[in-house]
Image (spheres, grey):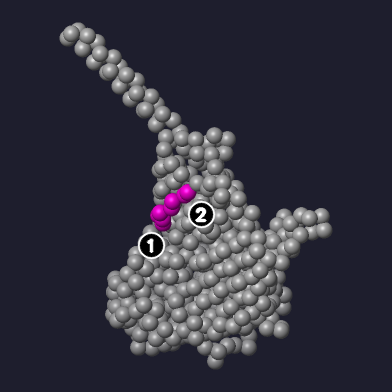
């Protein structure tokens, strides 16, 4: 009996070994996960973007999509499905993902400047059936008899639901969160808490004479303080050519300076000249950071000082957190949604508004991820004014504008400051818009300047950086890395060109202007670009700075 028992035990052991082997072998093979997987990436509190992958041909191909941003079937630089682990990297997006496959779910971390949790869910047949509603829907909001406002609704299918955002191109507002959306053949409805708006529309598509369904159109009412008519039509291959085309630099007027130690090249567009003034938008943040560094060196404050020294109801943040976009604060002050004039959105914001915004924050809203924040710089500007027992405008004049001979530069904190030499600004559609005032948000983007004055500022920054002064050490120290692309200083972004040579840069945009300033830290070259139209021309600017494009080629 003992011999028989030994034989049985041996057989059971062999069976166990075989089971263990095949289990290991199965786990060692990549899981076949062909299909469409989608999830929502929280880029900041209350702001989400749909992100997804599609795997085909038994794991042989993988593409990325972000329908809210109009990106479809982008091939990443590399991807790997190994056992139950999926990873991909896209060098062009400076992004990567690593996740674990668990049935119809992939849980992991998406990294683009900072690490963000992302869960992808596989779309089933009912989800795929709703793909007919995915896409961009555009229309002109009838504000009054003489004015319209272009809007674009971006709809993405996710597991058992939709993810949507709203764009207002002429106001340079993109990715406005949509909290609730329903869409079908009969109707379209959505709400946005951020801008206090909602839309309700009925299908006006009907059918063609042949019986085929026509392009989706929803006619209805958009309510934001008052009801306004809006018709949204889906963008297709057939009508895509009728959609928005980004403007080129100088289309409505502008100016460029390429600055080298022994030579400065300039070019003006349209009828602009040396006296023409431009809103420089967020390049103002570099000046606010300059003032922060100056007050720190003068021992008037410290970068580590808490915000609560100046705003009692503020969260536990350091001034450095505000200056390096690591405060975790929202992109814009929450009180911005109270604006009665979205063509001049910051004009009403007071110091009391900013204080109330801080008081109403919840603790989880200040988790210190890297997130670009006008709110943070609005606060920082007010902190510097409070600390100096002065106004931000007076401090800028005393510390920057007068010493650098920037005689045509000022802070547009109110309509009283508006200059007759300020160029007419145009939105991205080429329509004239009013100049912006910033009130208590001036530290985020209120400076108005000329090409000559901004060239003086660029030369001064290059000189400070090249001499590696105490001021430069504060401004250009890399406080953190942002993906594989850049490093964050005090306001300034630092990166390297394709030859490995480091430079600092910042751009800016308001409702009717766009701007760029960049320079090499060794003082060899700088570029200033000022445009009297809201448009993104960053690639051209970086190419001009590196020498990959010339002034004559524009």
Say if 63 sits above or below 215 in the image.
above
Residue visible at 30% across and 17% down? 14
Q: Earlier in the sequence, mark 2 or mark 1?
A: 2
Majority SS type along the magenta span: strand
Q: Which residues are magenta?
A: 114-121
Q: Residue furthest left?
A: 2
62 and 484: which is toward the camera: 62
Q: Is residue 318 left or right of residue 443?
A: left
Q: Quadrant of residue 398?
A: bottom left
The residue labelled by disc 2 is 160
The residue labelled by disc 1 is 369
- Distance between the alpha carbons at the discs numbered 2 and 1: 29 Å
Residue visible at 52% across and 76% down? 196
Q: What kind of element bears circle 1?
A: loop
Measuring from the top left, give residue 231's x and y in whole percent.
Answer: 68, 71
Measuring from the top left, give residue 304's x and y in whole percent.
Answer: 29, 71
Q: Is residue 453 left or right of residue 464?
A: right
Residue visible at 55% across and 78% down? 453
Q: Is residue 370 left or right of residue 78?
A: left
């Amino acid at each position: 009996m003992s011999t028989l028992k030994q034989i049985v035990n041996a057989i059971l052991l062999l069976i166990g070994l075989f089971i263990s082997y095949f289990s290991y072998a199965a786990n060692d093979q990549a899981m076949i996960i062909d299909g469409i997987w989608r999830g929502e990436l929280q880029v900041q509190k209350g702001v989400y973007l749909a992100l997804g992958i599609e795997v085909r041909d038994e794991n042989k191909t993988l593409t990325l999509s972000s329908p809210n941003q109009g990106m479809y079937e982008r091939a990443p630089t590399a991807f790997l499905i190994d056992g139950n682990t999926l990873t991909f990297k896209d060098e062009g997006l400076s992004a990567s993902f690593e996740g674990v496959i668990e049935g119809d779910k992939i849980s992991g971390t998406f990294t683009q400047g900072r690490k963000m949790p992302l869960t992808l869910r596989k779309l089933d047949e009912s989800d795929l059936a709703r793909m007919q509603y995915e896409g961009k829907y555009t229309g002109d909001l009838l504000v009054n008899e003489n004015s319209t406002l272009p809007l674009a609704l971006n709809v993405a299918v996710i597991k058992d639901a939709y993810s949507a955002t709203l764009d207002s191109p002429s106001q340079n507002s993109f990715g406005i969160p949509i909290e609730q959306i329903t869409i079908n053949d009969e109707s379209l409805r959505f709400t946005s808490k951020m801008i206090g708006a909602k839309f309700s529309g009925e299908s006006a598509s009907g059918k063609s004479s042949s019986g085929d369904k026509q392009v989706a159109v929803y006619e209805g009412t958009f309510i934001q303080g008052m009801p306004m008519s809006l018709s949204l039509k889906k963008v297709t291959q057939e009508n895509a050519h009728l959609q928005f085309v980004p403007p080129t630099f100088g289309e409505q007027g502008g100016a460029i300076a390429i600055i080298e130690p022994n030579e400065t090249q300039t070019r003006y567009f349209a009828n602009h000249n040396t006296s023409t003034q431009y809103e420089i938008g967020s390049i103002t943040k570099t000046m606010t950071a300059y003032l922060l560094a100056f007050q720190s060196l003068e021992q008037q404050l410290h970068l580590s000082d808490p915000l609560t020294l100046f705003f009692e109801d503020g969260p536990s943040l350091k001034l450095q957190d505000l200056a390096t976009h690591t405060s975790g604060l929202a992109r814009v002050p929450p009180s911005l949604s109270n604006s009665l004039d979205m063509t001049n959105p910051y004009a009403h914001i007071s110091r009391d508004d900013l204080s109330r915004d801080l008081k109403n924050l919840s603790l989880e809203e200040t988790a210190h991820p890297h997130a670009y924040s006008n709110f943070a710089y609005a606060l920082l500007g007010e902190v510097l004014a409070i600390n100096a027992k002065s106004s931000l405008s007076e401090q800028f004049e005393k510390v920057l504008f007068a010493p650098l001979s920037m005689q045509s530069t000022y802070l547009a904190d109110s309509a009283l400051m508006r200059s007759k030499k300020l160029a007419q600004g145009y939105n991205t559609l080429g329509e004239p818009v009013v100049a912006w005032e910033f009130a208590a948000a001036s530290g985020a983007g209120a400076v108005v300047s000329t090409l000559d004055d901004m060239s003086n500022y660029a030369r001064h920054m290059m000189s400070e950086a090249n001499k590696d002064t105490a001021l430069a050490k504060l401004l250009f120290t890399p406080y953190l890395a942002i993906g594989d692309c850049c490093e964050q200083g005090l306001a300034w972004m630092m990166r390297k060109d394709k030859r490995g040579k480091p430079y600092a840069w910042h751009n800016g945009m308001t409702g009717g202007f766009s701007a760029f300033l960049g320079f090499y830290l060794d003082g060899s070259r700088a570029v200033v670009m000022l445009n009297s139209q809201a448009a993104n021309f960053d690639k051209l600017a970086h190419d001009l700075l590196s020498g990959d494009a010339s002034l004559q080629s524009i």
